[in-house]
Image (tube, grey):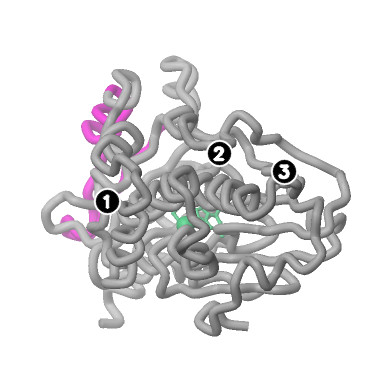
Amino acid sequence: MNAMERVTIDDLLKGAAKIAVTGHVRPDGDCTGACLGLRSYLLGLNPAYMVDVYLEPAPAVFSFLQGYDEIRLYTEGEYDLCFVLDVSDAERLGRNAALLEHAGRIVCVDHHVTNAGFAPESFINPQAAATCELLFDMMKEEQIGRETAECLYLGIVHDTGVFKHSNTTRHTMETAGALMEKGIDPSRLIQDTFYAKTYLQNQLLGRALVESIVFCEGRCIVSMISRKTMEFYKAAYEDLEGIVDQLRVTTGVECAIFLTETEFRVFKVSLRSNRRVDVSRVASFFGGGGHIRAAGCTMTGTFYDVVNNLSEQIVLQLESE
Ligand code: 5GP
Ligand code: MN
């Protein structure tokens, strides 16, 4: 089924009372906003609903969102209905993939081009800038309160890089506009959750930029943060948010690669492109996924193995045009 057909959240609820909501590992703004926004919307419809949100720890800058303190880690519990949000494949659910086995009905709402429909029921629209934008389309606007609007607006802000990425459409802006009318404080939300950086985050960004390497005649740029560095700074994964986007804006760069060493010779790979390279294809080739201009995967080997393997796929695309 297609999200364009405008199935509403209300249509999906039919008789469900025990509802679980979950998203992908290492939740970002869109994932956290979508899960908490849906929770807040459902409780607004009927406070008697039981709505449990299951996510890995979400960045503390999102802690002002309603329901953040109620987020749970994992479950083996049974639910009538489980919403799976901003998740492109079952692997991205991590331990919460268990929910797929324990829910009466599973509904996935997502905007990843690489989502092949792993869930029994899916509403996938890769044209949507954010899962939060899709959720808005499935909600009744008059039922959206300020707290829900804050969550959805935050998700859109984060997945569009504050309305600047190429995924931002007229519909994205109109959705954000409608959410602004719900009494949120957009400037503050953008400043506090997107632009504000801790001293530690800036130090890590600085290191990544200083140590970056350009190749392919300046069309590609790569940088890496090692486990040793992460341990030295006592840094968490969320402290690296935004580094790959800073690499991407280097003049002349088409494709940016940022690697985080998670274990010995294991790297979390973040890919971004500007105009030509479809990084979702590169990430999918290595078992990951994402969007055309922003994607990721996990790869093993030395730093040089990983960069060589990635650059081979990137160059294939650069040369085919
Ligand atoms: P980021 O680089 O910010 O971690 O992720 C960019 C995009 O790629 C996000 O939409 C995210 O969902 C997707 N992505 C990142 N890592 C993976 C991965 O390992 N597997 C899949 N399927 N998608 C990923
Ligand atoms: Mn998203």
Residue 84: percent from the left, percent from the top?
66, 58
Q: Residues within 10 Å of mark 2 (few under 14, many from 20)?
A: some
**Image position of 34 (left or right of 239):** right
SS at mark 3 in the image? strand
Task: Give whichever of 267, 296 is nearer the camera.
Answer: 296
The residue that appears at 54% across and 77% down in the rendered structure is 3
Q: Amino acid at mark 3?
A: Asp
Looking at the image, tell me whether mark 1 or mark 2 is earlier in sequence order. 1
Say which mark, if any, is on residue 291: none
Distance between the alpha carbons at the discs numbered 2 and 3: 36 Å
The residue that appears at 46% across and 63% down in the rendered structure is 141
Q: Residues within 10 Å of mark 3 (few under 14, many from 20)?
A: many
What residue occupies the far left of the structure in this picture?
251
Distance between the alpha carbons at the discs numbered 1 and 3: 29 Å
**Image position of 118 (left or right of 126):** right
Q: Amino acid at mark 1?
A: Val
Check contact, mark 2 vs mark 3: CB within 8 A.
no
Q: Name the image quarter holding residue 107.
A: bottom right
Instruction: Tell which tag, 2 or 3, sits nearer the viewer.
Output: 3
Residue 11: percent from the left, percent from the top?
67, 73
Check contact, mark 1 vs mark 3: CB within 8 A.
no
**Image position of 266 (left or right of 239):** right
Residue designated by label 2: 265
Residue designated by label 1: 162
The residue that appears at 30% across and 27% down in the rendered structure is 197
SS at mark 1 in the image? loop
The residue that appears at 56% across and 45% down in the rendered structure is 36
CB at mark 3 closer than 8 A to ligand 2?
A: no
Residue designated by label 3: 52
Distance between the alpha carbons at the discs numbered 1 and 2: 34 Å
Q: Is residue 139 above or below residue 41?
A: below
